[in-house]
């Protein structure tokens, strides 16, 4: 949202305020004020005209301006009703030089998981991708994935859903499912860079909020199905704010991740590109890799699919 529009909105929220007063306060023409008010109405904001001037009567449920309004983190939001994949759109923006932009969609028609898997993305979910330009060596970029997982868990818990993390990126609600629970959310990180520095990172976050698990692949659940508070606007804002708090504090992100991780202390089987690693998950390294105590000693696993086998003895 452009700066003047944001200031118009803030003034309306403290309103009523007349058009001429607004024009003077913001040092723009009355015609410009009128245009901003109309644009806000088009975006779904309820701008009332009373005798004392304009006042904000209500904020739209969802969409770019709705998420940006009241957001305590420096992200611009590009909203789509439908898009093939928010990660693909975010990659385009990243290669054009964008930074701190969030691509948000109501529905994806070609949502992707890791390793080319499909990600069901019907209307009602939170499907979003953050374009970031962190000042980090590539080896530390995975800590951003962990920070995103923490942010999703905290937003879910605030919405009343007792979610926890399965290394590295799954957000599960514990239960008897195959994976030790049903999947509420996932994170897909993509990046480009050189050996010493990351150029950009696209952090894709998919959360089943106002959707029916029956419409989703795999052993899935949703905020709605868990009886949580279904408010996508608040959910997205909370994820972005929490992520912003952690993104430049990898040590704090790791500590928070460890506190929310169901994987540590579990007997696990991790399918990696070069075979399976089975053992007790003992810790995560500062790079976000999982340390597994196997029959052949400790192994450090950087990427893979992790299954919880049973509680480690
Ligand atoms: C992930 O992959 O968990 C990463 C998912 C990232 C999705 C976001 S949405 C916004 C952005 N744009 C994209 O195109 N993607 C990102 P993975 O760990 O590979 O899990 C994929 C597996 O989860 C699938 O093979 C299914 O079994 C299961 N699955 C598919 N859709 C699901 C859903 N909506 N909820 C829960 N599980 C699902």
Image (tube, rainbow, N blue to C red):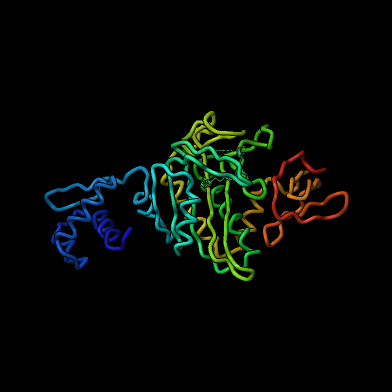
Residue 131: percent from the left, percent from the top? 49, 58
- Left or right of 196, for residue 57: left
- Please say if 40 is above or below 212: below
Q: Is residue 109 above or below residue 242?
A: above
**Farthest left residue?**
51
Percent position (x, y) of residue 18?
15, 57
Which residue is more in the foreground, 192 or 179?
Answer: 192
Question: Which residue shows up at 80% across the image and 45% down it?
Answer: 278
Q: Where ligand 1 lies, by image quadrant?
A: top right
Q: Residue furthest bottom?
A: 196
* Side of 309 where 125 appears, left or right: left
Residue for point 70% across, 46% down: 263
Task: Indicate the position of residue 271 as horizontal and vertical percent values.
Answer: 74, 45
Q: Name the quadrant of the C terminus.
A: top right
Task: Name the residue: 55% across, 69% down.
Answer: 135
The residue at the far top in this view is 214
Residue in the picture at 53% in, 48% down: 205
The quadrant of the picture occupied by the N terminus is bottom left
Residue 235 position, x and y percent, is 46, 46
């Amino acid at each position: 949202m452009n700066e003047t529009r944001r200031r118009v909105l803030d003034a309306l929220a403290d309103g009523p305020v007349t058009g001429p007063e607004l024009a003077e306060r913001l040092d723009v023409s009355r015609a410009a004020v009128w245009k901003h008010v109309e644009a806000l109405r088009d975006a779904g904001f309820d701008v009332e005209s009373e005798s004392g001037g304009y006042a904000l009567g209500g904020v739209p449920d969802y969409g770019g301006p709705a998420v940006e309004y009241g957001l305590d983190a420096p992200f611009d939001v590009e909203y789509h009703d439908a898009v093939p994949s928010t990660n693909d759109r975010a990659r385009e923006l990243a290669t054009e030089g964008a930074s701190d932009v969030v691509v948000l969609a109501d529905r994806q028609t070609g949502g992707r998981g890791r390793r080319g898997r499909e990600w069901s993305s019907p209307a009602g979910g939170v499907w979003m991708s953050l374009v970031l330009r962190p000042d980090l060596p590539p080896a530390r970029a995975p800590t951003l994935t962990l920070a995103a997982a923490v942010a999703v868990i905290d937003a879910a818990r605030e919405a009343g859903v007792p979610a926890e993390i399965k290394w590295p990126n799954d957000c599960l609600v514990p239960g008897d499912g195959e994976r030790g629970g049903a999947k509420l959310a996932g994170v897909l990180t993509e990046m480009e860079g050189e050996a010493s520095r990351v150029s950009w990172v696209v952090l894709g976050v998919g959360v089943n909020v106002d959707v029916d698990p029956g419409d989703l692949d795999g052993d899935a659940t949703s905020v709605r199905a868990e009886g949580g508070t279904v408010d996508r606007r608040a959910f997205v804002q909370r994820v972005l704010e929490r992520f912003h708090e952690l993104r430049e504090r990898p040590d704090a992100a790791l500590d928070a991740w460890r506190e929310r991780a169901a994987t540590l202390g579990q007997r696990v089987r991790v399918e990696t590109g070069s075979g399976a690693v089975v053992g007790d998950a003992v810790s995560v390294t500062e790079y976000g890799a999982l340390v597994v105590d196997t029959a052949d000693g400790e192994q450090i696993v950087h990427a893979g699919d992790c299954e919880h086998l049973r509680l480690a003895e």
